[in-house]
Image (cartoon, grey):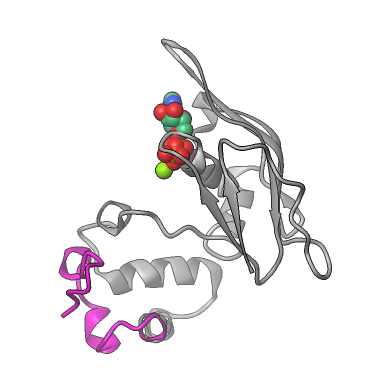
């Protein structure tokens, strides 16, 4: 099921979920940035929820708070420069005010983000495989060889041709997403 939430329009009622508790619950989320020019109100009173297996698309004009609210879900804001109120729960765990340590357990395992621009999101000096292996081993007690096999499987899963070779490529060797994969 795909629901679309327009960032500048009145918030809909919490989306219905078929069974148990929704996986992601965002309630009355407000994100503000104190700056030299005053307080930037980036997100105000945002409420939504997403059940397991549901897809939610958030649509809105540039600057309406899509990125800021999504980054907040993974606790990716600089705590010292951000004022956040409300509640974000991932599988029942509160994210607002959670410690870095608690967020590291959630991030990359229970919740993850695919960033808009892979060339800036991935480290240019490390191979794709090394970066997948690093994230995988943070959450799974396996050796490098096993983690690399999983990396190849995951590349295969998303349709990367010759995954056993491409795993050793650097980010700039990958397609920019315009259908010009090698
Ligand atoms: N770190 C920051 N400091 C101050 N203002 C910010 C910061 N990050 C984002 N903003 C402002 O918050 C608002 C929402 O931004 P954003 O979520 O990036 O919009 P978009 O919907 O285009 O993804 C914008 O006005 C943006 O300029
Ligand atoms: Mg954005």
User: Quadrant location of ligand 1?
Assistant: top left
Q: Nearer the viewer, residue 109 or 45?
A: 45
Give the magenta-colored segment's residue range. 156-182
x and y percentages locating residue 64 in the rendered image: 49, 35
Q: In which quarter of the image is residue 133?
A: bottom left
* Residue at (43% x, 33% y) in the render: 63
Residue 170 located within the stretch drawn in magenta: yes
x and y percentages locating residue 173 in the rendered image: 16, 69
Q: Residue furthest front?
A: 9
* Residue at (65% x, 67% y) in the render: 54
Relative to residue 87, is residue 152 depicted above or below? below
Q: Is the magenta stretch mostly helix, strand or loop?
A: loop
Asked if one can make out residue 150 in the rendered structure from this viewpoint, the answer is yes
Q: Which of 50 and 72 is in front in this view?
A: 50
Which quadrant: the N terminus?
bottom right
Relative to residue 156, is residue 39 depicted above or below? above
Asked if one can make out residue 89 in the rendered structure from this viewpoint, the answer is no
Q: Residue furthest right?
A: 20
x and y percentages locating residue 180 in the rendered image: 17, 74
């Amino acid at each position: 099921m795909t629901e679309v939430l327009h960032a500048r329009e009145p918030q809909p009622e919490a989306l219905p979920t078929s069974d148990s508790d929704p996986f992601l619950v965002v309630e009355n989320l407000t994100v503000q940035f104190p700056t030299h020019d005053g307080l930037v109100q980036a997100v105000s009173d945002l409420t939504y929820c997403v059940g397991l297996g549901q897809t939610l698309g958030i649509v809105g004009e540039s600057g309406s708070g899509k990125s800021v609210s999504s980054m907040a879900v993974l606790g990716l804001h600089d705590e010292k420069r951000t004022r956040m109120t409300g509640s974000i729960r991932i599988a029942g765990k509160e994210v607002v005010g959670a410690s870095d340590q608690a967020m590291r357990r959630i991030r990359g395992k229970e919740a993850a983000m695919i960033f808009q621009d892979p060339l800036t999101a991935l480290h240019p000096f490390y191979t794709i495989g090394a970066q997948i292996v690093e994230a995988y081993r943070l959450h799974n007690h396996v050796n490098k060889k096993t983690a690399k096999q999983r990396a190849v499987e995951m590349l295969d899963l998303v349709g990367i041709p010759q995954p056993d070779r491409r795993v050793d490529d650097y980010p700039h060797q990958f397609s920019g997403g315009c259908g010009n994969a090698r």
